[in-house]
Image: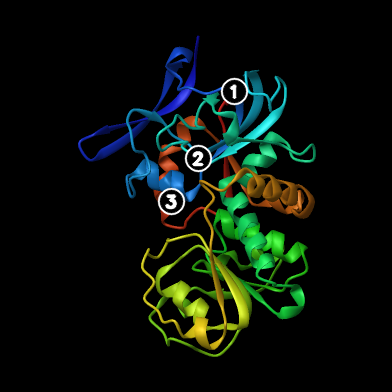
Amino acid sequence: MTFKALLATKTGDAISATVVDFNDADLMPGDVEVAIDYSTVNYKDAMALSGRAPVIQKFPLIAGIDFAGTVTASTHAGFQVGERVVANGWGLSQTHHGGFAQKARVPGEWLVKLDPRISTFDAMAIGTAGYTAMLSVLALEHAGLTPERGDVLVTGASGGAGSVAIALLSGLGYRVVASTGRLEETDYLRALGAAEVIDRSTLSAAGSPIAKERWAGAIDSVGSHTLVNVLAQTRYRGAVAAFGLAQGADLPGSVLPFILRNVTLAGIDSVNAPQNARRTAWARLASDLDLAKLASTTQTVGLGAVPGLAGPVLQGQVRGRTVVDVNA
C-alpha cells in the first residue's frame, strides 16, 4: 500500500522536497503505526527544508519533526489501536521518517497520548513550537518565577513558540512584554495577552554586560546579542528560558548577570526531553492553554505548500502557527 508523503532529497548541496507516493514497506522500524491527521511547520522544519542547518542527516527522508494522529497498529504495551497520540522531535526528520506524511511507524517511546481536551488538530496548532513554549514556562516555574515577581519578556513574539508562550503566560496571570520585529502585529500580540509590545531592535545590538533591571523572567527564541541583553536586564534572582538561535548561536556576553544578580539561564531541549517532561508539558497545555487564542494564531495548508513556507518562516514573515493537513 502507498500513502502521500513529503520526501526530502539532496543533490550536491541542494535540498528539495516533493510530495510522492510512499510505500508502507519502506517505513522505518517501530512498534507503533499511526494514521497521521496533521503535522505542522516549525522553525526547525524550515531550517531542514532550506538546508540552513544539517537537520536531516540521511537522504531521502520524509520531513517533519512532529505529528498527531491515531494508532492503527501496535505491539507496544503502552499503546492500543484507536488511541490518539502526538510525537515531537526524537529522530523525526533527522534520522527517521517524519510527520509530513499520511502514515508513520515509530517507537512507542516517542509518543504521548493526547488529553481528551486536545484534538489532533489542536495538538499540531500547538506543535513542537508550543510544546517547547510549555517546557520553557515549566522551567521558569521551577526557578521560582511567579506572576507577583514582575514582567516576563517573550522574544520572537510573533512566531509560533512566542505566540503560544504569550497565550500561556498571560493565562497564568503574568504581565507579558512581547518583543517583535513586526510592530504591525501589535494588535495580534495584545489579543494573545501581551500587555506591552517593544521593538526587537532595542535588544538586538551589542549592549552593556549588565543593565537596568526590567523583567523578572523571559523566554527567548533568538539567542546571540538579544539573549545577552535579555540577561543583562533581568531582575535579581530572575530566570530566562532559552531555546532558539534565530539571531545566532553565539552568546557574546558576560557572567555578571549570573554572579551579581543570581540570574538563572535554563536551556530548553524539546527533541530529547524525557517522557515525564513531555507528559507534564502536554497535560499543562491541556489545562492552561486557551484554545480560542490558539485558533487565532493558526493557518492550515496542504503537504504541497510546505516547501514554499521555509523561506518566509526563516525570515520571520509567518505569524503564529501553520498546521499541515496531510490528507488535504
Numbered label attached to residue 312: 3
- Tag in front: 3 or 1: 1
Tell me if mark 3 has few (under 14), some (14-19) or many (20+) residues whose alpha carbon lies within 10 angstroms of its own. Answer: few
**Picture coordinates of residue 141, whole percent (x, y):** 69, 66
Residue closest to the eye, 12 or 90: 90
Q: Name which residue type carries label 3.
A: Pro
Numbered label attached to residue 208: none
Residue 295 seen anywhere in this rendered image of the structure: no
Q: Is residue 66 above or below residue 150?
A: above
Residue closest to the eye, 25 or 179: 25
Q: Which residue shows up at 62% across the image and 74% down it?
A: 217
Tell me if mark 2 has few (under 14), some (14-19) or many (20+) residues whose alpha carbon lies within 10 angstroms of its own. Answer: many
Q: Name which residue type carries label 1.
A: Val
Q: Is residue 202 above or below residue 28?
A: below
- Tag in front: 2 or 3: 2
Q: Which badge, 2 or 1, comes first in the chain's sequence?
A: 1
Q: Name which residue type carries label 2.
A: Trp
Residue closest to the eye, 18 or 29: 29
Q: What residue sits right under mark 2 in the picture?
A: 90
